[in-house]
Image (cartoon, rainbow, N blue to C red):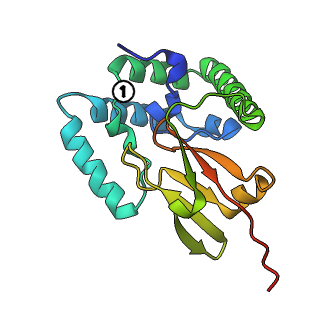
Amino acid sequence: MTRTPSSVDFYEVLALPFAGTSSLTHSKHQIRLAYHKALLKHHPDKAGAIAKEDFTKTAASNTSNNDASSSPYTIDQIRTAYKTISDPVLRAEYDRSLRLDRAKAAEREKTAHVFHTGLEIVDLEDLACDETPNGDVWYRGCRCGDDRGFSVTEEDLEREVEHGEILIGCRGCSLWLKILFAVEGDDG
């Protein structure tokens, strides 16, 4: 069973970044290369060799943005993504609908009238923490295999301080984490 086009992010399928209007800066050559790479990466006969190559590149650069091999896309999904992203008119319409969908999802999340598949509730203390010069970052691995699938910054927590909880979606799959936290006074 193939996914419906609305459930697949075409930019994720082609491993191209989407950042609103800046997505229009992808050249035809970049899109074509991303298309061919996606075909090779998700081809049943070639996926093993490409996955090993991506793993070594990923390990060397310490990024985990190439997690698509854990949930392969079909050839039809890759072709549809390429046809949509490579056509300027279709891409503009798709970008508009993608921005609208994301805005609606953000609004639903603010009003908490949304059901999240795979929602798990944890305390902030259950997450690992990295102290950085830009502020602390808490993270937790996800079942999908992403070691930092759930990540929340000090700034994120400050925005939700009055609620004492924050919803974070995994960056690699559709699972969600509700993180409960309390602010302690530091009058020291």
Query: What's the residue at 43%, 57% (across, down)?
Result: 63
Q: Quadrant of the N terminus?
A: top left
Image quadrant assignment for residue 61:
bottom left
Q: Is residue 85 above or below residue 120?
A: above
* In the foreground, 39 or 181: 181
71 displayed left or right of 117: left
* In the foreground, 90 or 107: 107
- Name the residue that disc number 1 marks: 73
Query: What's the residue at 52%, 28% (across, down)?
Result: 9
Image quadrant assignment for residue 102:
top right
Callout 1, which amino acid? Tyr
Task: Specify few, some or many for label 1: CA neighbours under 10 Å numbering under 14, 14-19, or 20 or more.
Answer: many
Q: Quadrant of the C terminus?
A: bottom right
How far across and how far down the image is residue 120, in percent?
Answer: 52, 42
Query: What's the residue at 67%, 19% (across, down)?
Result: 93
* In the foreground, 45 or 174: 174
Q: Secondary structure at mark 1?
A: loop
Q: Is residue 163 above or below residue 135?
A: above
145 displayed left or right of 148: left
Label count reads: 1
How far across and how far down the image is residue 7, in percent?
Answer: 52, 22
Image quadrant assignment for residue 108:
top right
How far across and how far down the image is residue 169, in percent?
Answer: 56, 42
Residue that extends furthest to the bottom in the rendered view of this protein: 188
* In the foreground, 72 or 29: 72
How far across and how far down the image is residue 158, in percent?
Answer: 76, 59
Q: Is residue 156 above or below residue 144?
A: below
Query: What's the residue at 38%, 15% (across, down)?
Result: 2
